[in-house]
Amino acid sequence: MFSGKPQGKRPSHRTILLLLLLQTRPSKQRTTTFRFLNRCLRNRTIPMASSIFTHCHYSSSPSSLAFRLHRHPFHVPPTCLRFSFLHSSPASSHVDPLAAMVTESSAKVIDGKAVAKQIRDEITAEVSKMREAIGVIPGLAVILVGDRKDSATYVRNKKKACESVGINSLEANLPEDSTEEEVLNYISGYNEDPSVHGILVQLPLPSHMNEQNILNAVRIEKDVDGFHPLNIGRLAMRGREPLFVPCTPKGCIELLHRYSVSIKGKRAVVIGRSNIVGMPAALLLQREDATVSVVHSRTSNPEEMTRQADIIIAAVGQANMVKGSWIKPGAVIIDVGINPVEDASSPRGYKLVGDVCYEEAMKVASAVTPVPGGVGPMTIAMLLQNTLISAKRMHNFE
């Protein structure tokens, strides 16, 4: 950057903005400054930053940039008005990512819908091949207890997905007040049914049922949801392979693979430690030779830890929790969260957002999954894939 006196002319406005951004501390102030300066540059009524800043001076020693502000509707925090120069070599590693941010380069969108469609097309071809070769059609049985609208919607979507790829779909709908024994009887029947290759119990279950007892009753060979303790145990052990991997974490890793994101040797942070997503996602990343940290509700410095990550999987269930200031420039973001927030402009009165502030992430990361349209479609695609894998394994079909 600049050191000593300028040679006869003032620096460009973009250079000034970059210096401002580099010198703002802490990160929260830096984010505020970055947003403000970018708005200045892109506002058509202010073609150059000179409309705001005047009287820039230097000295031959490390010095300050002093600015006078014209009246303007934008607010500049007082802490942003004086900044010391940095003396750095031309090879400084700090310039490129920040310069990219100032020019507002946008991250790549990781399109879960497109990848899920590609996977469903592959499954359709495999199902057809299996049917023609040995006359077997993979079958998935789903057990739904109660009348929760969201659960009913999920089951309906899974049934449609099965039909779209040629997988047989069986469904058992039980009332809310069903006993645990009744549910176990259905599971037992599907366990013994040779036409059923995968069994899924839709969660959550009514409060009077022991969820773990019910999930454990599913034969491990048909546990296409991947939640059987033996499957999770094998996932956690080096040198052991689970029969099935939980669908949502598996979908997250598949997105990274399909977008050629290198995992080996990278720093990865998983936000959330649930049995359904966070914990198995961390285990999968570890299997791919990433260095993995888990951020949870008792983590004392979540922002600092997350900002070190090359790969972030956010699965905490808190709308827009991960801000742009949490993200390392160039990181890859997999956002598992699906959170409804009020939106008066929507006919439904709400919209769905992820755990990551999408707009801010797009300005810092290299690739981001949207919500909706990111991880969600992949979860169902992985369920179909697991069902096909189960059918092939049971019938020794390659």
Image: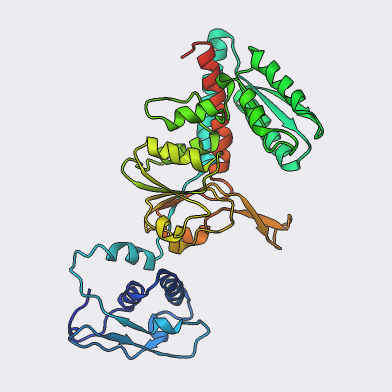
Residue at 37%, 59% (x, y): give it: 329
Q: Position of residue 163 (x, y in %)?
A: 65, 26
- The residue closer to the viewer here, 177 or 101, is 177
Up-down relation of residue 72 to residue 340 (above or below)? below
Residue 307 located left or right of residue 209:
left
Horizontal side of 56 relative to 246 (left or right) equals left
Find residue 339 and report its horizontal and vertical position in percent: 62, 52
Question: Residue 319 occupies which quadrant of the picture?
Answer: bottom right
- 195 left or right of 231? right
- In the image, taking residue 202 as reference, residue 95 lies left or right, namely left
Residue 148 visible in the picture: yes
Q: Is residue 191 or residue 368 the one in the foreground?
A: 191
Residue 115 in view of the camera = no
Report how many numbered discs are placed on residues in the image.
0
* Foreground residue among 251 and 148: 148
Q: Which residue is rendered at x = 37% and y = 75% of the image?
A: 24
For residue 11, above or below residue 326: below
- The image's colouring method is rainbow
Look at 69% across and 18% down and name the residue there.
188
| Coordinates of residue 289 in the picture (x, y in percent) | 34, 38
Task: Locate residue 269, reporting x and y percent.
Answer: 42, 49
Residue at point 30%, 88% (across, down)? 56
Quarter holding the N terminus is bottom left
